[in-house]
Amino acid sequence: MWRLGFFFHEMGYGLLSIFLPLYLMSIDPGNGLYYIGIFSAVALFLAIPASFLWGYLCDKTRRYKRYILLSFFASAVILYLFTYTTSVVLLVILYGVMSILHVAHEAPKNVLIAELYSHQDWDRSFAFYEGFTEFGWLIGLLLGFFTSTYGFSSVTTLFVCSGLNMVGFVLSLVLVRDPALVFERSLVSMEKRVDFASRGVFVASRLLDGASITEKLKRENVNAFCGGLILFSLASSILFTPLPVFIRNAVSAASLPAGLVFAIYVLNSGGAVMGYALMGRRSEQSMGKMSLRRIVLSRGLFAFVFIVALNLSAATSVGLATSLLVLMGFLYAMFIVSTLSLSMELIPAGKSGMFNVLIGVGGAFGSFAGPFIAQTFGFFSVFVTAGVIFLFAYVAFRLF
């Protein structure tokens, strides 16, 4: 039940995720892509130190609810303030402040899941949380389709986003509780050290006995894991930040309703929900590093397939892009659950915000680079660049 507030929060952000790029394009069509890049980059760059700060504070104080409430309340208030201006400068400032406060809930909710459930249930628990909130995101996209189809004003849409975050705040105020004891991550860290030492003793004893050894005594390469996260996030942001504009152009060229853009992203979110459901059913089974690498490689190949959409008729291009978005949403769900669970094992207490920092670093650069590349060189360059960086991420996860 404690996740219910997050459900409504994600509804608000699901609606905002597609509405905001299209809103910026409507303010200044000639420079809209640049504005989208500036908005996203400023927000994500500001969120990087903020993620680390909120993660440190929640671990230091062992209080998590207060930061979740701060995030939801601040989002509701700032989205309400959006309705008072169409100035791009003021909107950037407000969006940047909202980003700093919005990420206050990310590290606390990760820690809550890690501490409220045993280690063997982490994958299932993260999958359930992500799937549940992704369904909220999907409902938000459906709201966007509804408001776009029936011609709701921008102010009304922003009121809806603000109201959904306020509902999330109220529900979290009532339902979220800080854990009485915080020790599960420390136990997991201790188990990993003991396991490594045990394997070391076994290998040494076998060598002293003159036996041949095939087992490799190797720790995870944490630096490669972190690099893989940054590169994956960078490629995803380069591809997905300007993608709503690409899809809107294809929908417009095919003389299809503008609200179809939201409907396509509903299907993308639906693919993610299916991915989370699959991960949840795996229960205690670990996805494994091999599967993680295959997911990253597949995302890269799908990025290259988007190039084909550039040479098809508008209607066929919309169909291909929709299919790719569903598949990529499915793969992203599996990726995020696996890496979240791994990060709780690899990142020590006191640095629980590091996962969001790493994702934010790649996202910040990518969210500016993607629209800039699209505006300057075209979407062909966007798809090629994203695909190549996904391949580098694949290499990093192989080293991990």
Image: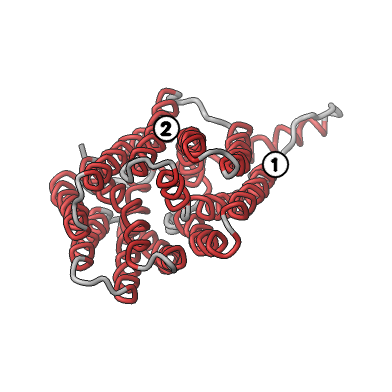
* The quadrant where residue 277 appears: top left
Q: Is residue 331 visible?
A: no
Figure quadrant of the C terminus: top right
Amino acid type of the residue that numbered disc 2 sits on in the rendered structure: Gly
Q: Residue visible at 34% across and 38% down?
A: 263
- Residues tagged 2 and 1 counted as in contact (Cβ below 8 A): no
Q: Earlier in the sequence, mark 2 or mark 1?
A: 1
Q: At which x and y percent is residue 136?
A: 27, 40
Mark 2, other Cα within 10 Å: few <14 / some 14–19 / many ≥20: many
* The quadrant where residue 87 appears: bottom left
Label 2 vs label 1: CA separation?
36 Å
Tell me, for residue 362, which label it has, or none: none
* Residue underneath mark 1: 218
Q: At which x and y percent is residue 245?
A: 44, 53
Q: Residue visible at 57% across and 65% down?
A: 376
Q: At which x and y percent is residue 392?
A: 67, 49
Q: Is residue 29 left or right of residue 8?
A: right
Figure quadrant of the N terminus: top left
Q: Residue visible at 66% across and 49% down?
A: 388
SS at badge 2: helix
Q: At which x and y percent is residue 17?
A: 34, 52
SS at badge 1: loop
**In front here: 344 or 74?**
74
* Residue underneath mark 2: 271
**In front here: 199 or 162?**
162
Q: Is residue 59 visible?
A: yes
Amino acid type of the residue that numbered disc 1 sits on in the rendered structure: Lys
The nearer-to-camera label among 2 and 1 is: 2
